[in-house]
């Protein structure tokens, strides 16, 4: 596995070679099709939770914290046990955890299906198996951890739709699995991309995702500042 810190050493070479390390496989100016199966916007404000894994949680969080209707995001671990939910253990690739982001949103402002559309469009490449860009291992796998039957149905139907319409050049490998527990990551991982914008890893791997969100979903993009 190539660590994020080790990856920094290779960034200059990558830039010279113009290697698109953080580009989604769909890489387009327009977002992928909207899901045909979704819940309508709620009639009254409320709070729902979704959990997504799409490679390094720094980038996934940097996308969803800038989505209109999202009130809170938390970087963490899902797929394993509480006893092994630490960064040092997860990076051994033996815990079953995936770096994940818990997204708390208002269903009267944004639907679960819209979140999935962003997840598949700009947050990560759903065709990469057990990796995202330079990060390799099962902890960087693509996964949707559903909290109820509606989320399961919408996610599975959307994947089938995208496959049927051949939206991506390669098969989608995203797991759809029940959430058994979400464990908050260490404090220094929270809002990492926001607090370290000049980090070469953030500039190469995560900034393009935020720019793609702003370009593809201008009606859903909001500026982000922690605590607001």
Image: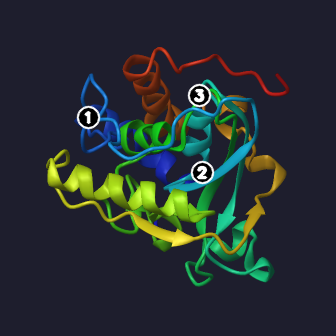
Q: Nearer the viewer, residue 92 or 43?
A: 43
Residues at circles 2 and 1 in contact by the CB criterion of under 8 Å: no
Q: Is residue 114 above or below residue 25?
A: above
> In terms of image quadrants, where is residue 167?
top left
Q: What residue sits right under mark 3 in the picture?
A: 67
Which quadrant does the C terminus fall into?
top right
Q: Secondary structure at mark 2?
A: helix
**Structural distance between the alpha carbons of marks 2 and 1:** 20 Å
Say left or right for 125 vs 155. Answer: left
Q: Secondary structure at mark 1?
A: loop
Residue sitting at 29 percent across and 39 percent down? 20
Residues at circles 1 and 3 in contact by the CB criterion of under 8 Å: no
Q: Position of residue 184 (x, y in %)?
A: 78, 59
In this rendering, the count of numbered labels is 3
Q: Residue furthest front?
A: 43
Q: Position of residue 107 (x, y in %)?
A: 64, 36
Q: Earlier in the sequence, mark 2 or mark 3?
A: 2
Q: Marks 2 and 3: which is nearer the front?
A: 3
Residue 57 image label: 2
Q: What residue sits right under mark 1 in the picture?
A: 27
Say left or right for 119 vs 87. Answer: left
Residue sitting at 63 percent across and 34 percent down? 42
Residue 5 image label: none
Q: Position of residue 24 (x, y in %)?
A: 32, 42
**Structural distance between the alpha carbons of marks 1 and 3:** 19 Å
Residue sitting at 16 percent across and 54 percent down? 164
**Structural distance between the alpha carbons of marks 2 and 3:** 16 Å
Q: Earlier in the sequence, mark 2 or mark 1?
A: 1
Q: Position of residue 157 (x, y in %)?
A: 34, 57
């Amino acid at each position: 596995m190539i660590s994020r810190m080790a990856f920094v050493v290779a960034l200059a070479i990558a830039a010279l070679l113009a290697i698109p390390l953080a580009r989604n496989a769909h890489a387009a100016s327009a977002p992928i099709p909207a899901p045909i199966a979704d819940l309508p916007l709620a009639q009254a404000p409320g709070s729902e939770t979704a959990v997504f894994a799409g490679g390094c949680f720094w980038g996934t969080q940097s996308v969803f914290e800038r989505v209109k209707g999202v009130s809170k995001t938390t970087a963490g671990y899902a797929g394993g046990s509480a006893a092994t939910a630490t960064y040092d253990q997860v990076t051994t690739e033996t815990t079953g955890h995936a770096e994940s982001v818990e997204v708390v949103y208002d269903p009267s402002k944004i639907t679960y299906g819209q979140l999935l559309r962003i997840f598949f469009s700009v947050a990560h490449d759903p065709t990469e198996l057990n990796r995202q860009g330079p990060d390799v291992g099962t902890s960087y796998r693509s996964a949707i951890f559903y909290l109820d039957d509606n989320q399961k149905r919408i996610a599975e139907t959307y994947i089938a739709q995208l496959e049927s319409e051949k939206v991506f050049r390669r098969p989608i490998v995203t797991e759809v699995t029940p959430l058994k527990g979400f464990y908050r990551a260490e404090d220094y991982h929270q809002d990492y991309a926001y607090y370290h914008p000049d980090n070469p890893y953030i500039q190469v791997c995560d900034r393009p995702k935020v720019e793609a969100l702003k370009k593809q979903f201008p009606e859903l993009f909001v500026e982000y500042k922690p605590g607001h």
